[in-house]
C-alpha cells in the first residue's frame, strides 16, 4: 500500500516504501531530491536516481501509473498534485529549470528501459533456439537408437516471439543519444515557452509507453516458454532428457552426451531465472527440489529409477511413500475417524470386500443387486457421520477429504495409477466461479450447514419447510418441534443428504441398475484428471451455450423503488443457477430446481457428476431445455398449458396435443412428431427437450432439424444470439420463423418507451435496473 504523500511539500520515505502503485489512478507526480527509486511493472524493472520525475510519462498516456514506484534507498522527494497533462505548466511555472529536468529525466528512463528491452529480446530469442534445438536432438536420439520418446505438443506448437507493435528504432536511438546530453544543455534548450518541452515530453512518453508494453509482452512470452524447460506437468525438456538418459543407461548404452544436455538445461534454467529476476523484477517458479531429486536419480543406481521414469517424474520418492501410507486401509481409516459402531463397520468391510471379489461388477443378478443395496444403506449413514466430524476438525486428513469430495472409499477399488492421480488432483480451476457458482458435494453441504444455502427440494417437490409443515399436519411433530427444526442446521444437512444427494447421486451416474456410491476403477476408461469436472469446465460450457441461447437465464421479476418514484415495474434479471457436483463417474445431468424457495428471482439448481467422459456441454444442453420448460411453467402457474395465455409451455403443449389436426404439418412430418412423442414417453417437457437440443446443436449452425411450427416457437421463446440470427436469417425458413420474435421485440421496446415517459412525467427516475432491461431489448 502506498504511503501518504503531502502535496507541494518535501516528503521522506524509508527504504522499501511504496510511493505509487501500478494501475492506481494518478493524483500526483514527484521529483526525486535524494535517494533512488525502483520502477517495476509486469515486464521491466529500472532504477531512477535523484533529479528524475516519477509519473510524468504515466500521466500522459495511461491516466494510471505504469509502474509501482518503490523507495530503493531512504528517499526524499517533492510532490505536485497533477492529474492530467494540461496541468504540467503549473510545474514549469514554479521553477523554469523543471522543464529541462523533466526532459532529461525521461531520456534517462528511455535509456534504462531500452537496456531491459534489449536483454529480454535476446533472452527470448536464445531461449526459443535452445528449446527447439534440443527438442530436435531428443527426438532424433530416440529415433536413431530405438528408445521411446514423447511428443511434447507445447514445444511443437511453440513459435518464435513476434511483436504485435512496431517501435520506431530510429526515434529510440535518437533519444538514447539524447540521454548523454548534459543537464545544463537541457535546461538551456528548454528555457523558451512550454511548447518545446511539452512536445518532447509527449513524444518521449509515447515511446516509454511502447517500450513498457513491449517489455510486458516479452516477459510473458519468456515466462510461458521457460516452463517448457522444467515444470510439474507430464512433459518438459528436463524430464524427457532425464528419462531418456536413464533408459539408455538401464539398457547398457552410453548416455554421457545426454547427461551433458541435461547439464546445459540446468544452466539455461539458472541463467534465465537470474536474468528474469534482474530485468523484470519477478521470479520464475521452478521446483528446485524436484529437479535435484531427478538429477540425483540420473547419477545414482536407485532401484526406483524405472518407476520414476514410468511416472514421468511426477512424484518424488517421498511423495509416493506418503501416498502409500495415507491410502493404507482407507475404509478402516474412514470408519475409525467417525467412531462408527464396530459391528456396522465390520459389516461394511465385508460388503465392500464382497464387491471387490465380484467376478462381474456390472452384473444385475439378484445377489449383486442386494449387495449394492446394502452398501448404499451403509454409505450415506457413514457419509453423514464423517461430514459432521470433519466440520469440527481444523485439519481434515487427506483420505477423509477425498471421501467427502469424490466418494473415495477403499484403495483396493482403484489401480495404483488411479490412486496417485486422485491424490494429486489439481483443483486450481475450481476457482473459476463465473457465471455459475459450482460446488462439490462437501462444500455444498457446508453452505447448507452455515445457512448460506437452504436445503433443496426432495423428489416429491417438497422443500425442508414444506416437509416439516406436512409432518406437523400428519401429527408426526408438534408446532414447537417444527419451530426448533426450522432453525436446526444439522437436520437441514441430514435432509439434504437423504434426499437431494442420495437421489441425484444415482441418477447422474447414468447406471441406475449397477450404481454403487463410491469410486471404483473398472468403470473408468480414462485418466482420472481427464474425467474430472471442474468449475472451469462447467462455466466454459455455460458461456459457450450463452453464445447460442443468450437469454436462457433471463426472467421477468417485479421491481419496486419507492425512493426513485417507481411503485411497480417488471424488469429482466439474469439469474444464474447453482451447480452441484455429485461424487461419482456419470453420464447424466439433472435440472433439480428451476428456482429456490418461492421467489421467482431466486436461482435454480443443476446437478452434474464430478467425473465424466462425455461432453459436459451436451449434458448441459438437455438441462437447459428442461430449465426453460420448468421456469416457464413455474412462472405461468396453473395457466402453463392454457393457450389463451401465450407462453412457451402453453403453445408447445397445444402443438403436441393437436399436431394431427395441424394443417401446417405434412403427413411425413406428423409421423416424425408421433415418433418424437413416443421417444419422449408422452411427457411434454421431454418432447420439448428433443426439439431444444436440435435447435441449439443443429439449427444454430444453419442445419434444418425442426419442422416449421416447432422452429417458430423456438425462435420466439428461445431466440438465438444476434450474431447467429444475423447469419441464419439469410435462409428464408429462418427469416419466416423469426418474424414473430422481431414483432414482439419492437412491441416491447415501444411499451418500455411509453412506461419510461410515464415514470418521468410522474416525477420518477429511470434507474439502472430499468435501463438494463431497455438495453436488453434495444440490442436484440
Image (spheres, rainbow, N blue to C red):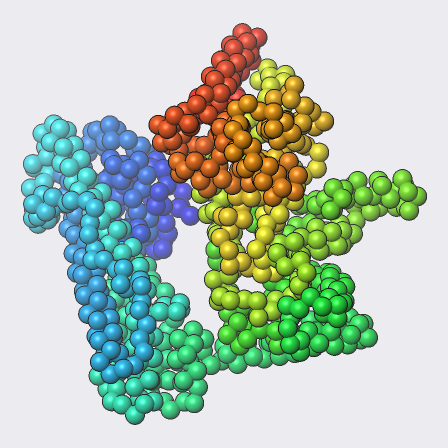
Residue at image location 70% in from the left, 28% down from the top: 637
Which quadrant, please, contains the C terminus? top left
Towards the viewer: 684 or 758: 684
As drawn, the residue found furthest toward the front would be 667
Q: Position of residue 431 (x, y in %)?
A: 50, 52
Q: Position of residue 587 (x, y in %)?
A: 57, 55
Q: Position of residue 646 (x, y in %)?
A: 61, 22
Residue at image location 57% in from the left, 17% down from the top: 564
> Is there any visible trace of residue 575 in the rendered image?
no
Residue 761 to residue 533: above or below: above
Towards the viewer: 88 or 140: 140
Residue at image location 62% in from the left, 57% down from the top: 509
Residue 643 to residue 345: above or below: above
> Is there any visible trace of residue 203 in the rendered image?
yes
Q: Position of residue 438 (x, y in %)?
A: 56, 49
Labels in figure, total: 0
Residue at image location 36% in from the left, 49% down from the top: 18
In the image, is 742 to the left or to the right of 101? right
Residue 199 to residue 312: above or below: above
In the image, is 220 to the left or to the right of 319? left
Q: Quadrant of residue 515?
A: bottom right
Amino acid at each position: 500500500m502506498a504511503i501518504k504523500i503531502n502535496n507541494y511539500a518535501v516528503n521522506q520515505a524509508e527504504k522499501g516504501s511504496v510511493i505509487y502503485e501500478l494501475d492506481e489512478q494518478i493524483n500526483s507526480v514527484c521529483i526525486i531530491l535524494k535517494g533512488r527509486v525502483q520502477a517495476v511493472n509486469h515486464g521491466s524493472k529500472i532504477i531512477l536516481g535523484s533529479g528524475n520525475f516519477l509519473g510524468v510519462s504515466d500521466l500522459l498516456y495511461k491516466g494510471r501509473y505504469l509502474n509501482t514506484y518503490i523507495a530503493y534507498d531512504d528517499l526524499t522527494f517533492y510532490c505536485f498534485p497533477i492529474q492530467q497533462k494540461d496541468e504540467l505548466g503549473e510545474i514549469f511555472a514554479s521553477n523554469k529549470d523543471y522543464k529541462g529536468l523533466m526532459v532529461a529525466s525521461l531520456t534517462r528512463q528511455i535509456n534504462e528501459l531500452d537496456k531491459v528491452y534489449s536483454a529480454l529480446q535476446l533472452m527470448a530469442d536464445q531461449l526459443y533456439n535452445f528449446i527447439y534445438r534440443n527438442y530436435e536432438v531428443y527426438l532424433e536420439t530416440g529415433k536413431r537408437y530405438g528408445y521411446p520418446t514423447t511428443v511434447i505438443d507445447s514445444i511443437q506448437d511453440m513459435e518464435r516471439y513476434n511483436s504485435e507493435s512496431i517501435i520506431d528504432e530510429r526515434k529510440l536511438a535518437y533519444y538514447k543519444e539524447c540521454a548523454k546530453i548534459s543537464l545544463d544543455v537541457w535546461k538551456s534548450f528548454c528555457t523558451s515557452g512550454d511548447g518545446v518541452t511539452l512536445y518532447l515530453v509527449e513524444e518521449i512518453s509515447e515511446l516509454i509507453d511502447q517500450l513498457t508494453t513491449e517489455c510486458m509482452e516479452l516477459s510473458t512470452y519468456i515466462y510461458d516458454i521457460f516452463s517448457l524447460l522444467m515444470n510439474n506437468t507430464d512433459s518438459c525438456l528436463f524430464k524427457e532428457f532425464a528419462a531418456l538418459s536413464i533408459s539408455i543407461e538401464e539398457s547398457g548404452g552410453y548416455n554421457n552426451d545426454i547427461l551433458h544436455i541435461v547439464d546445459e538445461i540446468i544452466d539455461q534454467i539458472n541463467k534465465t531465472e537470474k536474468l528474469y529476476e534482474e530485468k523484470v523484477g519477478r521470479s520464475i517458479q521452478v521446483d528446485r527440489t524436484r529437479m535435484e531429486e531427478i538429477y540425483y536419480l540420473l547419477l545414482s543406481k536407485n532401484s526406483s529409477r524405472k518407476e520414476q521414469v514410468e511416472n514421468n517424474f511426477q512424484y518424488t520418492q517421498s511423495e509416493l511413500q506418503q501416498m502409500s501410507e495415507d491410502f493404507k486401509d482407507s475404509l478402516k481409516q474412514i470408519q475409525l475417524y467417525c467412531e462408527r459402531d464396530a459391528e456396522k463397520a465390520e459389516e461394511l468391510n465385508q460388503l465392500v470386500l464382497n464387491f471387490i471379489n465380484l467376478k462381474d461388477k456390472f452384473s444385475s443378478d439378484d445377489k449383486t443387486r442386494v449387495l449394492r443395496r446394502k452398501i448404499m444403506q451403509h454409505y450415506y449413514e457413514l457419509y453423514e457421520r464423517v461430514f459432521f466430524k470433519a466440520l469440527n476438525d481444523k485439519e481434515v486428513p487427506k483420505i477423509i477429504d477425498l471421501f467427502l469430495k469424490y466418494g473415495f472409499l477403499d484403495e483396493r477399488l482403484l489401480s495404483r495409477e488411479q490412486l496417485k492421480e486422485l491424490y494429486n488432483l489439481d483443483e486450481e480451476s475450481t476457482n473459476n466461479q463465473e457465471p455459475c457458482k459450482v460446488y462439490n458435494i462437501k462444500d455444498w453441504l457446508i453452505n447448507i450447514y452455515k445457512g448460506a444455502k437452504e436445503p433443496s427440494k426432495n423428489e416429491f417437490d417438497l422443500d425442508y419447510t414444506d416437509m416439516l409443515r406436512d409432518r406437523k399436519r400428519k401429527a408426526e411433530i408438534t408446532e414447537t418441534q417444527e419451530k426448533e427444526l426450522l432453525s436446526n442446521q444439522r437436520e437441514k444437512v441430514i435432509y439434504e443428504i437423504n434426499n437431494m444427494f442420495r437421489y441425484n447421486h444415482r441418477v447422474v451416474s447414468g447406471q441406475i441398475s449397477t450404481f454403487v456410491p463410491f469410486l471404483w476403477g473398472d468403470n473408468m476408461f480414462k485418466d482420472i484428471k481427464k474425467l474430472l469436472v471442474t468449475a472451469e469446465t462447467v462455466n466454459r460450457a455455460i458461456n459457450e451455450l450463452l453464445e447460442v441461447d443468450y437469454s436462457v437465464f433471463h426472467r421477468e421479476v417485479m421491481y419496486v423503488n419507492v425512493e426513485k418514484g417507481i411503485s411497480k415495474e417488471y424488469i429482466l434479471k439474469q439469474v444464474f443457477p447453482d451447480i452441484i457436483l455429485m461424487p461419482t463417474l456419470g453420464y447424466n445431468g439433472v435440472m433439480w430446481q428451476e428456482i429456490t424457495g418461492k421467489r421467482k428471482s431466486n436461482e435454480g439448481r443443476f446437478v452434474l457428476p464430478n467425473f465424466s467422459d462425455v461432453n459436459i456441454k451436451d449434458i448441459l444442453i438437455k438441462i437447459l431445455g428442461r430449465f426453460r420448460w420448468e421456469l416457464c411453467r413455474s412462472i405461468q402457474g396453473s395457466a402453463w398449458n392454457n393457450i389463451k395465455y401465450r407462453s412457451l409451455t402453453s403453445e408447445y403443449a397445444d402443438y403436441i396435443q393437436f399436431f394431427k389436426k395441424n394443417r401446417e404439418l405434412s403427413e411425413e412430418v406428423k409421423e416424425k412428431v408421433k415418433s418424437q412423442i413416443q421417444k419422449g414417453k408422452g411427457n411434454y417437457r421431454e418432447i420439448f427437450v428433443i426439439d431444444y437440443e436440435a435447435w441449439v446443436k443443429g439449427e444454430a449452425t444453419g442445419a434444418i432439424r425442426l419442422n416449421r411450427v416447432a422452429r417458430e416457437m423456438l425462435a420466439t421463446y428461445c431466440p438465438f444470439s444476434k450474431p447467429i440470427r444475423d447469419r441464419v436469417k439469410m435462409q428464408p425458413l429462418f427469416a419466416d420463423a423469426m418474424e414473430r420474435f422481431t414483432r414482439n421485440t419492437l412491441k416491447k421496446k415501444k411499451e418500455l418507451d411509453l412506461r419510461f415517459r410515464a415514470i418521468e412525467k410522474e416525477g420518477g427516475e429511470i434507474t439502472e435496473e430499468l435501463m438494463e432491461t431497455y438495453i436488453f431489448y434495444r440490442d436484440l
